Image (cartoon, rainbow, N blue to C red):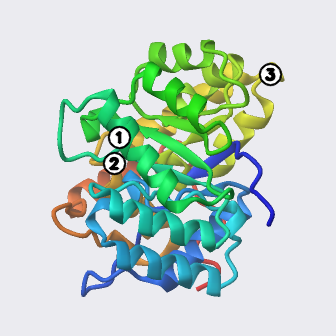
Amino acid sequence: MSVPERMSGVLTPVVTPFGNDLAPDAKRLTEQCRWLLAQEVGLAVFGTNSEANSMSVDEKIELIDRLLEAGIDAARMMPGTGCAAFTDSVRLTSHAVNSGCSGVLMLPPFYYKDVSDDGLFAVYAEIIERIGDARLRIYLYHIPPISQVPLSLPLIERLITSYPETVVGIKDSGGDWANTKAMLDAGWDDFRIFVGSEAFLLDNMRNGGDGCISASANVNPAAILALYHKWDDGDGEAMQAGLNDVRERFIQFPMIAALKAGVAHFSGDPGWAQMRPPLVALDAGQQAQLQKSLEDIGFTMDGLGAGK
């Protein structure tokens, strides 16, 4: 039984296409994943920007199966598997491990707030023990602006100490560079630290980090990956400024809707704009504003939609 290598680099929380019936569209998702892999970034399917928590466990399992049947490489995948109920996390995580995924990105249970570190440790431990598989690699997901359930440094250290071959990394989407820097300074052995926005990528790499898992990698993957590889070549500051400029044009609007509008526009497939309630698509005026803003800087998504 082979165990996965620890992941690093740039990964994309892949936006999820939905049909007019609001069901996930596996065919569109497969084509998008192929395009992203061709840009040499990994696939963090079922992330926040994937509308993951608007989908059921059954839907996510079906999508994993469909992606693998279509030839998408499981070794390039880090699906989000953290659910509000730990039994759902166990089921979805087990499926990801058995499917050959290199790791999983795991939110803490996010419905109850002000929970203790002891409670959070207990739920991660329960998931790990119930799965009981040496292939399991968990990347913690710290996103308190959304989950309202932060992962403290003492909790992270306790998990690493108790499960050093299982809890192997984290995505820090807190938006607080001081917190990320504290993780980097902690000196945890071979613990992979990803920032949740490419806006922090240069700082992360300069301080020994391992990459980013960013929404913007849905639309700007090659440029983000270029900074990851060339951050110390002398042009890092200029490359970072370019990434920030593109990101700023998308975050002027609700981010997930803007990403989907971008994919819809550059792929020539308007169906990509469909959101699953409670989220809603950009209106026509917002779409036009976004397109104009991107045209102003000559932004494109080369090759997108070529497989249609």
Circles 3 and 2, Cβ within 8 Å, touching? The answer is no
Badge 3 or badge 1: first in the primary sequence: 3
Q: Residue at x 63, y 80 (%)?
A: 68
Numbered mark located on residue 255 in the image: 2
Give the Cα distance between marks 3 and 1: 27 Å
88 sits left or right of 295 in the view? left
Q: Residue at x 58, y 77 (%)?
A: 31
**Mark 3 is on which residue type?**
Asp
**Mark 1 is on which residue type?**
Ile
Q: Residue at x 62, y 72 (%)?
A: 98
Which quarter of the picture shows residue 291?
Answer: bottom left
Q: Report the residue marked by disc 1.
A: 251
Give the Cα distance between marks 2 and 1: 5 Å
**Mark 2 is on which residue type?**
Met
Numbered mark located on residue 290 in the image: none
Q: Report the residue marked by disc 3.
A: 232
Q: Position of residue 159 (x, y in %)?
A: 52, 33
Q: Residue furthest right?
A: 233
Badge 3 or badge 2: first in the primary sequence: 3
